[in-house]
Amino acid sequence: MRSLVQEHVRAWSCEDVFVGCSGNLTIERIVHDLKTVDRLHGCDVTLYSCALGSYFAGEMVEVELAPAAAEQFGWLGGYLEDPPDRLATILLASAFAGAVGKDNVYWTRLRSAYEAQWPHLHVKTRAKVEAAELELASFAARDVCEWIDDVPLEAGVISYPPFYSGGYETMFAKLEQLFRWEAPSYEQLGPEGFQEALFDKFRRHKHWLYGAPEPIEGHERELVGHTQVTNRDRPMYLYSGSFTKRRIVRPKQELEPPPFDRLGSKEELGEELRIVPIRYQQFCSLRSAYMDVHIPPAVATPFAVLVDDKIVGACAIDLQRGAVTFDSSKVESPYAILLSDFAVAPTLYPKLSKLVLYAALSTEAQLIFQRTANSRVRSLATTAFTNRSSSMKYRGLFKVVNRNEAPPETGKRFRVNYAAPAGRWSLEEGFAQWKARCT
Amino acid sequence: MEGQMHVSKRKVENMRPIATRIERLDLRELELLELNARYMRHETYAQLVANIKRDGVLTSVPFAWLNPESGKYLVLSGNHRVQAAIDAEVFEADVLVTDDELPEEHRIAIQLSHNALVGEDDPSVLRELYDRLDVDLRVYTGLDDEQLGMIEQPSLASLTEANLEWQSIAFLFLPEELERARAAFALAREQVATDEVWLARRGDADRALDAIADTAAAHGIRNVSAAMTVVLEIFERHRDELVEGFRDGEGELRHKGQVPVSAVLGTDRLPAELAARLRHVLEGIAGRNESTLLEALSALLADTQGDGRAEGRGDDQRTRGDGEAGQEHEGEDRRRPRKRRARPAKRARRRPAPGA
């Protein structure tokens, strides 16, 4: 994205470049670094962006603490003196704002930490602001759909509007509650609205670049960039009126050979069941080889399951529980999510995937998970997409938490959530049980 | 080694020319290899499916052998293509087939050779060809500008707020064995980049983690260090219970080491007025005895223990032979200790200690 913007703007023959939806001024800073444009202009509507933009345009917005905030955070008032002071305060407050209005121990602790460290953090942030080499010829706190009408047609224009209606409002709502300022009025951009009201307006200019989260139908020839960094990231499509360079960046998992051999197709199992942490790249190799190739990979903490020194399978655990939230009345907390689990194949053992689960539910695995997470792991939870009402792999070891219709993109009928207590047996006991039941 | 080479050479020589023909087959009826060394990343496979969907056909032909046991064709080369075509709902395709008898070794050799005998790319020619393509067709190739080294990454100085500063502490729970504990401690000191490392018995790990987990649940938080802070606050409120560490239920001393003052008073802070009075008393005793404040306190207690016995609270802990000092100042200091004794009595009524 950064590279594409520079490559395109470098080829433009215009004195002024206008950036709509400035955000944190990334595009302005990329273009500024080129030193090929005489004047840069920005536009946005949030306090965060307007503070940044107006500061670098030399006309810092006036802000004061909102009455409610002044009551609670009066000490902030001493940090709104001059423009760099005000900008540093707003930038810092954007991180601090998340803790406002929440009263549990965590947020209280965070608020106290900010208050205690504020003088020091403010000095550091102010130094960053003052060191930034950026100069804007103008900045408009305006609705981009109206602002673009006033931009001269011979100027270059760039915009990468927010993906979703209300996305930025939610992100900065808390910050806006802290300060009183002259906020511009604007209409939220919807998926229909952006193409009609904005994309067409941008395309009228001599030079233009426009980023969108979805392909824009009928404009394939103007598509100059398609970037997606990881398999679960949202892609970005970049359109331009002037063909200079076309660039694509596609996700590509980094692979690395696993540190052990897998169990051979005609090889018998050894004596000792083990579970060991492996590198993520090694796990990606195993997953690509043995897991359903249709499932997009997610980042999790990976482990190999071995018998003696032969890999029989692998699993990956989301210890932060970022991916899915389970009903804590039905799953004993704290729980970790078993994001992937699979066995190598083919082998002499048709139920080898259950051995991976026996290993994952062992006390040794629980200890490793806890040590990795730095917290208790009392149970494991997982989700299976299946055409049957239950997954044979989890049956008997995990209990069904709930069962829903699967999303269409999975190609399966049911989404079944499962959970099981962690640390149910030692690896040795688990291995013995698996042998008794599954071989 | 040489013998093995002769055998391999003879086997290759024995491979006869293979009779092949192209047949239009239902891909769903083909057998796929059970053991295949070649695998695909999710994203590569997804692109292959997308390409076949876009083309509506398979543009390279799989190779399959008639398996006399099943009567079906087994794909020796092109397993991913066949599977991807089925996923792309392209169910029929031209397949290069052979009905010849092919021993397993020969089939494996064909399978591996199709994976291994592939050419190399000249990077500059590759870039030149790739550069002629528009965005959609670049995606089609399965390559991208990044892997071809065609993207320069402009560096951008950060323009964000300074982050909160944190300090970290690691608790390492270790097995009981001393040697392992020592080794792990040495390793921890080398590897763990935290501000402090504490060691504790592994047997306590679950209890500690349970305490943190339960505290987090009670407060509706997930942050472990915030929960730990609450655990410490709860501890602070119960510091007086540390008395169990140095005095048993019968009042017997458990050890003669040092204990924190808060274990006696339940707090390490005193109201300023009380602190000033205590200090005044102790300084008075210390001044007269030319002793330290601690010795003065000892003398004071020796004196009050005399009172305790008189009230029937027998205590034989006067072990330091400092009764003399206490006796010297009996007249001056006896009233205040009596007042202080009243407070523990109130606490005991409010929250009786187990076994008290």
Image (spheres, coloured by chain):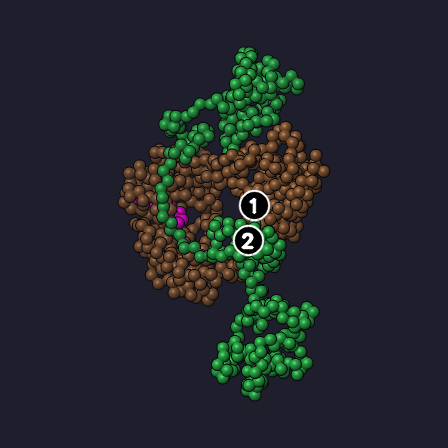
Q: Where residue B82 sits in the image (x, y, percent)?
A: 56, 24
Please state the chain letter of the residue tagged with numbered disc 1 in the rendered image: A
Residue at 44% from the left image edge and 37% from the top image edge:
A227
Q: Is residue A305 left or right of residue B137?
A: right
Q: Nearer the viewer, residue A201 or A72?
A: A72
Q: Which residue is mark 2?
A: B172
Residue at 58% from the left image edge and 76% from the top image edge:
B320
Please state the chain letter of the residue tagged with numbered disc 2 in the rendered image: B
User: In terms of image quadrants, where is residue A386?
Assistant: top right
Kind of residue at badge 2: Leu
Q: Secondary structure at mark 2?
A: strand
Kind of residue at badge 1: Asp
What is the residue that sits farthest to the front in this orientation? B321
Question: What number is the disc on residue A163?
Answer: none
- Alpha carbons under labels 2 and 1: distance apart: 22 Å
Specify start and end residues of the magenta stretch as a single range.
A16-25
Q: Which residue is mark 1?
A: A318
Q: Is residue B311 left or right of residue A190?
A: right
Q: Where residue A256 sits in the image (x, y, percent)?
A: 50, 35
Q: Where residue A423 sits in the image (x, y, percent)?
A: 65, 48
What is the residue that sits farthest to the right in this orientation? A436
User: In terms of image quadrants, where is residue A129?
Assistant: bottom left
Quarter placement of the C terminus of chain B = bottom right
Confirm whether residue B332 shows in the render. yes
Chain letter, colour green in render: B
Q: Colour of chain A?
A: brown
Residue at 45% from the left image edge and 60% from the top image edge:
A114
Q: Where residue A108 sits in the image (x, y, percent)?
A: 51, 61
As for residue A338 lying within the magenta part, the answer is no
Residue A239 against residue A131 in the figure, above or below: above
Confirm whether residue A149 shows in the render. no
Residue at 45% from the left image edge and 53% from the top image edge:
A172
